Image (cartoon, rainbow, N blue to C red):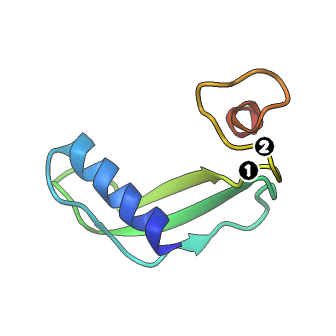
Amino acid sequence: METLITTAERVLSEAWGNPVRLSAAERQSGTIARSRVLRCPVLQAPEGAPATVIIKCAQGDGSQKYDPEDAQPGTAAWRLFSE
């Protein structure tokens, strides 16, 4: 889970133009097994940033690799986008 949080911090830092640090993630209950949905408190961010962020990550499907460019019905990306 730490790698996912580190990636989210990097992406948010780039998007918001300032360093972002997130706290420990809390897995959201009731989510579908094909994806991971986490809520992370924001520890450091530019003014006006939300207090928490939601991170959603595809789990993949056995040998079928997640490819965000392949959103054809039945693919891992299609399922993630359709949840």
From the viewer's side, name the closer residue of 70 and 15: 70
At mark 2, the secondary structure is loop
Q: Residue shown at 59%/32% (left/top)?
A: 68
* Rendering coords of residue 77 (x, y %): 69, 34
Q: In which quadrant of the rendered view does residue 8 lie?
A: bottom left
Is residue 8 visible to the viewer in this orientation of the structure?
A: yes
Q: In the current view of this chain or complex, which residue is farthest to the front? A: 63
Q: In which quadrant of the rendered view does residue 37 lie?
A: bottom right
Q: Which residue is mark 2?
A: 64
- Pick the quarter of the image with the C terminus: top right
Q: Which residue is mark 1?
A: 60
* Rendering coords of residue 52 (x, y %): 41, 62
Side of 7 relative to 73 (left or right): left
* Rendering coords of residue 12 (x, y %): 31, 50
Q: Residue shown at 68%/33% (left/top)?
A: 81
Badge nearest the viewer, 1 or 2? 2
* Rendering coords of residue 2 (x, y %): 46, 74
Q: Would you say the residues marked 1 and 2 are in contact, meaning their CB atoms lie under 8 Å apart? A: yes
Side of 10 relative to 63 (left or right): left
